[in-house]
Amino acid sequence: MFEIRIICDPADTDHITTALSDTFATGAVRTYPTRDGERTRLYVTADHRPAPGLWPTAEEAYALAPSIIREIGWTAGTAADKPCGEDLDREYWLRKAALLDRIALSDETDGISGDASDAAEAAAWYLIDMDRADNRNHGRPHSPEVLNASDDPRGYVRQEYAHWAKND
């Protein structure tokens, strides 16, 4: 762990703190004016991000999962029980994304080409965006903030589902 001090123009503060959090695992940024009051001092405790580990395999992630049929019933029932316009919670989106991932994996194993993979990836990105907005994720080894289009969004779903299944 180390401390970073930056002196910058106040207009650059947000850009700099975003770049730091993209590069390092950071704590809260402490902001103070410089003595002359024209610039800003930023102090942040940081550490190197751990080397990304492999995503959990489907077998590891879904070892405790109910059957696909049961999950279809749960997701359909949960969606049907919500009044029109009421938001569905993270558990719903996590389980739906995991269900779609499992269906896509089954199709891929059986050599079936269809839109299951696209649906699974779209649900995964929805979960990632939700986790970014709410900061409600397990995030080890991969947090949603560092994922981009070249990463594996379905791997993120497996990571989060494996953690959820063991801890909730």
Image (cartoon, rainbow, N blue to C red):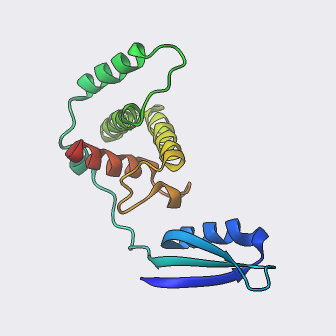
Q: Where residue 95 sits in the image (x, y, percent)?
A: 34, 34
Q: Quadrant of the C terminus?
A: top left
User: Residue 29 at x, y = what percent?
Assistant: 56, 70
Residue 62 location, x and y as percent? Answer: 24, 43
Q: Is residue 59 above or below residue 18?
A: above
* Side of 10 relative to 96 (left or right): right
The residue lying at 78 percent from left, 76 percent from top is 9
Can you say whether 129 is above or below 28 in the image? above
Q: Residue furthest left?
A: 64
Query: Which of 7/160 is in front?
Result: 7
The quadrant holding residue 32 is bottom right
Q: Is residue 134 above or below residue 104?
A: below
Q: Position of residue 54 (x, y in %)?
A: 33, 63
Relative placement, left or right, of 124 versus 20 is: left
Which sits in the foreground, 114 or 124? 124
Left or right: 54 in relation to 39:
left
Question: For this rendering, which residue is in front, 130 or 1?
Answer: 1
Count the labels in the image.
0
Location of residue 132 with respect to 99 vertically, above or below: below
Q: Residue at x 39, y 57 (%)?
A: 139
- Which image quadrant: the N terminus? bottom left
**Which of 69/111 is in front?**
69
